[in-house]
Amino acid sequence: MKRLITTAPWLMSVVGWLITSSVSAQSTMVKVTDLAGREVQVSSRVERIILGESRYIPALAILDKEQPLKRIVGMLADFKQTDPGSYQQYRSKFPEIENIPQVGHASADSFSVERVLSLKADVAIFGLGGHGPTSRNAELIEQLERAGVAVIFVDFRQNPLVNTVKSIELLGKVLGREKRANEYVEFYQEQLARVENRLAKIRAGGALKAPSVFLHSRVGLQDLCCETMVHGMMASFVDASQGENVARDIVPGAAGVMNLEYLLTNQPDIYIATAVGSSQGSKERAASGDENQPLYIVLGAGVDEVMAKASFEDALKDAGVMELNAIKSRKAYAVWHHFYNTPLNVVAVQVFAKWMYPNEFADMEPKQTMQTLFDRFQPVPLNGTYWVSL
């Protein structure tokens, strides 16, 4: 009995430590609301991240310019596969990107829960839509959360001009980088307002006649004419720059295919193609000598303007759209496809506005906006062509 009495203070000390530790652990959890509207408890010290799409690396770089890969322990392979130009830029600066374990290829079906659990992640970052798991993958999300992996959703594509700011703010909170997130959001909102405010003045003056626009998505990727976007993604940029998307009342859903005969009968004022080609792909095609390989428009990191323009002209001939009046009158443009799923998207809105209303936006310099975004918020330099005209 005496021994029990003498050890009681030690036991009490241990119990007290456990209680204190438990309270401390609870106090380090942060509650956030993600872009799917879910309330999620996340540790205030997130050290190990899984990316549902590796194309979110430039978004993480906004928050941690010096070490954007530091916390990533696993990711899908979509960045390397779909945007090799940007991936090569990151690989040159951060060779360790090649050593990050892959938890799938470029689709939700390839995502390996077992692989993720073995990597002991704190947080998995998914998109509302896209190549990786989405909010529709309920069983997968439940498995991760049951194993202690917090799942949060961001969005740069379904409603990009609204959700980009919310997504960066969410990531800033989750990663403890709120000050950096606020700096980006301030710049982003300033640049978007420059377009919105000017369009509002033009509308108020009664001088705004919206041009009709055909948005030709992923030219060359499919052997049919003509894939387009109607809601979200780049269609949002057409709407924001006050263009009339000719597919809006024709194609159901977010994206679909327009009939070329319809376009020839109902000619759009402006033609905008999206470019999925890269300089590496272009060189590989030339080296192969296989003229049957699809012709893509080449834009993005590592692409100079001469290459971009030549690929645009070649792809248009191959796509069978040369009879469109917009192309004959050289109101035809091409834009880097990956603007549709990146926080750099505000630049595309400025570019579209210049194409829609060249006189009213003559003094706007989207290239300067892009340069500032890279200088302030990316760890790699701006080195490429991201849009081009005929």
Image (spheres, rainbow, N blue to C red):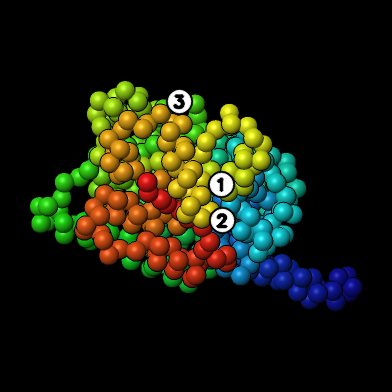
- Closer to the chain start, of discs 3 and 2, is 3
Mark pair 3, 1: CA separation: 21 Å
Q: Quadrant of residue 49?
A: bottom right
Q: Residues within 10 Å of mark 1 (few under 14, many from 20)?
A: many
Q: CA distance from mark 1 to mark 2?
A: 8 Å
Residue assigned mark 3: 224
Q: Which residue is mark 1?
A: 278
Estimate how packed mark 3 is, as few (under 14), some (14 to 19) or many (20 or more) residues with alpha carbons within 10 Å.
Answer: some
Residue drawn at (72%, 71%), measured in percent from left and top? Answer: 17
Instruction: Characterize the local packing of mark 2: few (<14), some (14-19) or many (20 or more) Cα atoms within 10 angstroms.
Output: some
Question: Residue at position x 68%, y 51% from top?
Answer: 74
Q: Does 155 sit left or right of 94 as displayed?
A: left
- Disc 1, disc 2: CB below 8 Å? yes
Residue type of the residue flagged with mark 3:
Leu
Q: Earlier in the sequence, mark 3 or mark 1?
A: 3
Report the residue marked by disc 2: 302
Q: Is residue 282 left or right of residue 18?
A: left
Query: Label 3 vs label 2: CA separation?
Result: 28 Å
Disc 2 on helix, strand or loop? loop
**Outermost residue to the left:** 206
> Where residue 29 appears, x then y in whole percent?
58, 62
